[in-house]
Amino acid sequence: MANKLINQMGLPKSIANVFTARNITTAKEALSLTEFELMEVLDVNLAEVTSAIARISEITCPPYQTVLSLMEQQVQKEHNGGHLSTRLKGLDDALCGGIPFGVLTELVGPAGIGKTQFCLKLALLASLPEAYGGLDGRVIYIDVESKFSSRRMIEIGSKSFPEIFHKKGMAQEMAGRILVMRPTSLSEFTESLQQLKISLLQNQVKLLIIDSMAALVAGEQGQGAPRQHLLGWHISFIKSLAEFSRIPIVVTNQVRSQIHDEACQYAFQVQHREKALHEHTEYDSHLVAALGIHWAHAVTIRLVLDSKSGKRFIKLAKSPISPPLAFAFNITSSGISLLSDGGIELTGPEINTIHCQGHSDIINFDGKRFQ
């Protein structure tokens, strides 16, 4: 708007011609001068300058908005954008309905904490008929680490929705809606992404899951930051894919050990260094999300799956619409379930801290073992 031409702003022709004659043609050029400077340059009186500037400002500057109106717009945007319900009431309430469409949602946590369990349940929910709260569509599940278990998914479905899965042929129909891809390298994954844009439309795909992003670069050459940079193009492409398709995209991320110096990357954090180092010694291991800060900025929602004091927690660590919250959960035969719908509000470094206290990587129930 700053470059909008003055002669297109509906000013009286006489004053518009004066602006043009003095080579002041855009709103930016006019508004960069004071009223008295304009009086001198244009050789007109103060009343004419004030009237002209008021008109230019009205057209060029955005209108004021109250906090209330902005909040109402955000709520309406979230409502219209669509969500995939997780069937975890407390988490759905915090996210205004569930996993949002059109953005990246990340699940990060140590091995065995329940990331794949969460993904399996989401894939199932997206494939359910709309009458049962699903999206009634197909799911593309990119299974990088070969952790996808169709048997486990059927079990989650039969336990969670017995009225559907006990009908003849329904289990096979639901399973047939989930398309599993298993790229063996980053280059193969890159080729798959190129084809996904068309597949999402042709196959009525309602959910894309990538499990996991970090595993894609684990076998590539390079360590640390250079390895993270391998995903630069992929991050941009996946974000654009979410915006283009308007479906939820869920990615899982692994964890790595935190270097002590990372606790005080900025000057204002130095005073907390001793406290941070002391806190690290209280746990068997202190972990952070892999893939680095560029990836962290790319995701809109970050869910940290954590284990502390013998309990598992889902932490809503990053969200534009919710404060940081933690929900205690268990993994049962029907998948992940919250112990309470009320979240615990978090503050400080605890929001993104990932603890590992020797928690078993294997979940055992009903005589079965699951990753």
Image (cartoon, grey):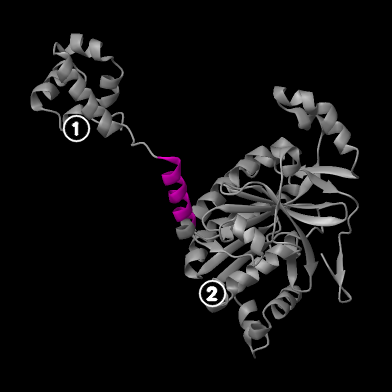
Q: Residue at x 45, y 54 (%)?
A: 77
Seen in the image, is 276 located left or right of residue 247?
right
Give the mark nearest the N terminus, 2 or 1: 1
Provide residue 29's location: percent of width, then percent of height.
Answer: 27, 20
Q: Amino acid at mark 2?
A: Asp
- Foreground residue, 352 or 287? 352
Residue marked by disc 2: 136
Vertical comparison of 327 with 282: above or below? below
Provide residue 38's location: percent of width, then percent of height.
Answer: 22, 14
Residue marked by disc 1: 9
- Foreground residue, 133 or 116? 133
Vertical comparison of 41 with 324: above or below? above
Q: Quick one: SS at disc 1?
A: loop
Seen in the image, is 159 located left or right of residue 234?
right
The magenta span reads 66-78
Q: Amino acid at mark 1?
A: Met
Quadrant in which the C terminus is drawn: bottom right
Q: Quick one: SS at disc 2?
A: loop
Q: Quadrant of residue 96?
A: bottom right
Q: Residue at x 65, y 43 (%)?
A: 296
Q: Is residue 192 visible?
A: no
Q: Residue at x 75, y 77 (%)?
A: 155
Q: How many marks?
A: 2
Vertical comparison of 283 with 165: above or below? above
Provide residue 294's location: percent of width, then percent of height.
Answer: 63, 39
Q: CA distance from mark 2 to mark 1?
A: 50 Å
Whether the magenta-drawn stretch holds residue 71 is answered as yes
Provide residue 187's location: percent of width, then percent of height.
Answer: 64, 52
- Foreground residue, 16 or 58? 58
